[in-house]
Every structure is written in C-alpha cells, then in structure tokens.
Amino acid sequence: MKKRITYLSFIVALGCVMSSSFAQTSVATSFPNKPITLLIGSSAGSTTDGLARVIGQEITLATGQPVIVESRAGAGGGIAAQAAARAAPDGYTLFITTNSTQAANPHLFKKLAYDPVKDFAPVSGLVRGHMLMVVHPSVKANTVAEFVALAKQNPSKLSFGEGSSSARVGSELFKQLANVQLTHVPYKTNPQAVIDLVGGQTDMMIADFTTTLPQVKAGKLRALGVTSPKRSALVPDIPALAESPTSLGLAGYDMSHWNALYAPAATPATIINRLNDLMKMALAKESVKRFAMQNGIEPFYTTPQELGAFQAQELERWGRIIKAAGIQPE
C-alpha cells in the first residue's frame, strides 16, 4: 500500500512538472499575441528613438503584432526607467535604454526612483558606438588643438551643451584630460542641445552621430574629432581625439555609448528567451545593419546573461570615470 501511494505521488508530481513545462512552452510560442510597447527615455530624433522604431518594425514583421514606441524623456532617462520598472512583467512593456540609466545615473544622481539592476531583467544588447565632438562655426578652432588653446586663453568662456550622460561625461572627460575649463549647459535631450548649438547659444558638444552628423553635413556645425580610439569608417576624414598631439593629454581618450533591451524584473524566463530570439533576428536584418552604419554604431547582440555581466562592468567603469572627472551627484 505504501509503495502504491509513493508511485501515485510520483505520477502526480511528474504530471505537475509536465503541465508546468507545457504551460511555459505554450506561453513562449504564443508570445506576443497583442501589441508591444517600447519605452524610451529620449525624444524623437535621437539614436534610441530611431533604433526603437527600426527594431519595432522587424518585430512586427516577425510576429504580426504592432509595436508602439513611447517616449518619456527627462531625468537622464529616469522617467522612462521608472515607468518600465513598474510595468507588468509580462513582456508587453519593454525598455530600450542606454548606459545613461543602467550605468551612469547611479553615479550622477543622489537618489533614483528605480534600481538599474534589481528592477530589470536583461534581454539583449542592441547597439554600441562612439560620438562626435562638434563646434559652432563661429568658434575659431578648426582642430582639437586649436580648441584647447582657445579654451585655455578664455577659461570658462566657452560652453558645452549636453542632453545625455554620454554627452555629459564625454565632455567632462575631455575637460579633465585636456585641462581646460568649460561652462556646462544641461538639456533634457541631445536633440534639444544640438538645436541651441546650431543657434550659437553654446559653443561645443560631444554627442552621438545621429544628433550631430546631419548638422555637420549641412554645414551648420564643424566636427573636430571622434571619441573612438581610431577613426570611424563613417567619417574617415575626421581624426580621433586620441590622435591629438601628446601634449594635449588626450592620447587615451575613449568614450562610447550603448543601447540594450530590458524587461521588468520577474518577467518569466520563457518570455525573456523569446524576446532574446527576436532581438537576435532583428539585429541580423539589413534594415538594422543599415541604420547602425548610418549612425556610426554597430549591432551588439548578447544573451541575457552576457548583458547582465556587461552592465556590471559598465557600472564600475562609468563610476570610475565620473569620480575622476569630479562630477558631483545631483
């Protein structure tokens, strides 16, 4: 009798496991079955906005479900991060974000309304790239060396605008290494900052290619350098800041930015894996590759585990750079 009960218990337990496994498989294969919202922390015209739209199109083509890109700009992406963190963990509200919210903000703000690690489930890296240093045409500098000389002759009289942590830290690192004093002018987004730069209300900006390169091509801004260790294939005629004369102190300059996809914490692993598969598919598509090339970035696919490990490294790296640049949390 005891053996019979044990056997029946085993059958019941096996049935529960199989039922659970079937349910998880069913969820994975049926997902998504309604529209997906991609939250972003930047405004229209930004790299993140363009990236979200091109990836959203590929998700729609693959699943037949509409993808809505919803912008909630402000607080260095913190407003969108908080909304994403509080969303239902069902895979239908996702967060396409940058190093700003996930690596830099914990070192730039005394208090955050979200936890960049505990509140999110990593899905996949998306893209990564470098930036351009640009100036208004009225600035009497055609090279980085001339800009540094002008800044040293006029301490704090030249200004730089920024609307993201990458742009802020990129400029602050430039100040630190070149030993110059520039006046900081903050904006909610990089597109807003570049508008004022084009209008001559600020003098310099270090920001993503999407924001700056069109203005350079239109002759409205002058590009002095790229923030990668070597020249960019997209703008081979523009030198890397690291190429500057050794006396400027910029030989080791390297500043990059990245985008990744996150879901709210507690999102089921089956859905995370399904989303990861969709990202792997999307990042291999020509539309995404073309967008990346046009914006000076490259596809950056990762597994969820790889993204988690990468973010941990970036948290440490950005904290170290921000501290060395003397930036005080606000």
Image (spheres, grey):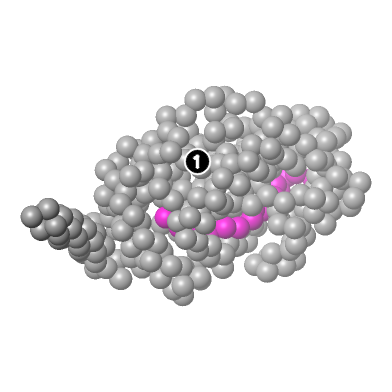
Residue at image point 90% right, 50% down: 246
Is residue 179 left or right of 208 when viewed as pictured?
right
- With respect to residue 162, does 226 lie above or below? below
Tell me the residue at 57%/64% (across/down): 298
Q: Nearer the viewer, residue 8 or 155?
A: 8
Q: Position of residue 265 (x, y in %)?
A: 36, 43
In the picture, the quarter occupied by the C terminus is top right
* Residue 200 locus on image (x, y percent): 64, 40
Q: In the displayed structure, does residue 181 sit left or right of residue 318?
A: right
Tell me if I can see residue 199 in this picture: no
Disc 1 is placed on an element classified as helix
What is the three-letter code of the residue carrying label 1? Thr
Residue 141 in sight here: yes
In the rendered structure, which segment of residues is drawn in magenta? 123-140
State the residue lying farthest toward the front: 1
| Residue nearest the viewer, comparing 55 with 312 | 312
Q: Quadrant of residue 272?
A: bottom left
Tell me the residue that label 1 is attached to.
101
Q: Residues within 10 Å of mark 1 (few under 14, many from 20)?
A: many
Question: Foreground residue, 94 or 133?
Answer: 94
Residue 323, position as x, y percentages in the image: 69, 32
Q: Is residue 250 magenta?
A: no
Q: Is residue 179 left or right of residue 306?
A: right
